[in-house]
Image (cartoon, rainbow, N blue to C red):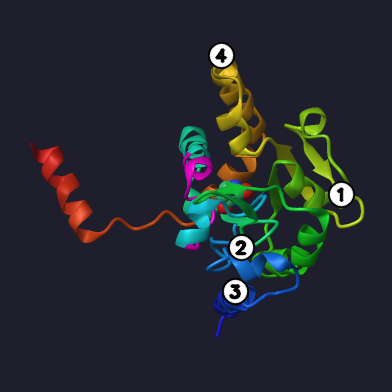
């Protein structure tokens, strides 16, 4: 088996193992864990905080409202989400019940620390060139210290201890919750932060061989040229 296939199989096994994780109390209340998603060798690993309500039900990261906003940013930047590895610092949804609604609760340090080894294993297997930390929980997990997101956002931070390059920015939920009058400016500032990673993404894309068009696709192009 190639290294890539072995690492992909190991990620799958880890994902199954996180379902059964009870190293903190969160797993007992969630239908499933939400593990990372994306290819081994992805140039960037994007780390969020924890799955939200939708992610917890679907079992995939960033598929709810925050994920939709992230997808919009990815499209705007000309990146492709399926080339990124997207994951969270904490693999189970922390919430409190209000009536029937499950309201997000920020994970505590204890939960983030209990989950940390899963993320370390993902990093080892995926081997990204750099990281994007979405929000304070992810930034703290990746840099091993409390991070003032508004002060340190939008620049590469090199972690001396691990050699990791981390770009810190706001969590997309912060934009969704923000003052509607400031929404446009907040969106532009967020895109500007994320765009710091664009040269890395584009360099990696340029190295990959161009995908061969499918036969049907090629035929369609020929017909268009002839029309
Ligand atoms: N927020 C996160 O941090 N991660 C998700 O997967 C969804 C929302």
Q: Earlier in the sequence, mark 2 or mark 1?
A: 2
Q: Quadrant of the C terminus?
A: top left
Which is more foreground, mark 2 or mark 3?
A: 3
Residue under label 4, please give it: 181
Please provide percent x and percent y for residue 6: 59, 80
As drawn, the residue found furthest toward the top would be 181
State the residue in front, 208 or 134.
134
Q: Earlier in the sequence, mark 2 or mark 3?
A: 3
Please provide percent x and percent y for residue 68: 46, 41
Q: Earlier in the sequence, mark 2 or mark 4?
A: 2
> Taking 181 as reference, is 4 above or below it?
below
Q: Earlier in the sequence, mark 1 or mark 4?
A: 1
Residue under label 1, please give it: 159
- Mark linked to residue 19: 3
State the residue in front, 121 or 51.
51
Tell me the magenta residue range: 59-68
Q: Earlier in the sequence, mark 3 or mark 1?
A: 3
Element type at mark 2:
loop
Label 1 environment density (alpha carbons within 10 Å; few <14, some 14–19, many ≥20): few
Which is more foreground, mark 2 or mark 4?
A: 4
Q: CA distance from mark 2 to mark 4?
A: 40 Å
- Mark linked to residue 41: 2
Q: CA distance from mark 3 to mark 4?
A: 41 Å
Tell me if the residue at label 4 has its CB under 8 Å from ligand 1.
no
Q: Earlier in the sequence, mark 3 or mark 4?
A: 3
- Mark linked to residue 226: none
């Amino acid at each position: 088996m190639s290294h890539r296939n072995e690492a992909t199989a190991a990620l799958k096994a880890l994902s199954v193992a996180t379902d059964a994780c009870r190293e903190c109390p969160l797993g007992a209340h969630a239908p499933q864990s939400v593990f990372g998603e994306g290819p081994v060798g992805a140039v960037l690993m994007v780390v969020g905080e924890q799955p939200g309500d939708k992610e917890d039900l679907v079992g995939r990261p960033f598929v709810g409202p925050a994920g939709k906003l992230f997808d919009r940013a990815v499209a705007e930047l000309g990146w492709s989400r399926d080339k990124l590895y997207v994951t969270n610092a904490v693999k189970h949804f922390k919430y409190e019940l209000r009536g029937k609604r499950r309201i997000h609760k920020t994970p505590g340090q204890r939960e983030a620390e209990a989950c940390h080894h899963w993320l370390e294993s993902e990093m080892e297997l995926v081997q990204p060139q750099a990281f994007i930390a979405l929000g304070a929980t992810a930034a703290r997990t990746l840099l091993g210290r409390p991070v003032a997101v508004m002060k340190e956002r939008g620049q590469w931070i090199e972690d001396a201890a691990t050699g990791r390059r981390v770009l810190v920015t706001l969590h997309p939920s912060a934009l969704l919750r923000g003052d509607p009058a400031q929404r446009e400016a907040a969106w532009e500032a967020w895109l500007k932060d994320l765009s710091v990673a664009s040269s890395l993404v584009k360099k990696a894309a340029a190295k990959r061989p161009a995908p061969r068009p499918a036969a049907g696709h090629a035929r369609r192009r020929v017909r268009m040229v002839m029309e």
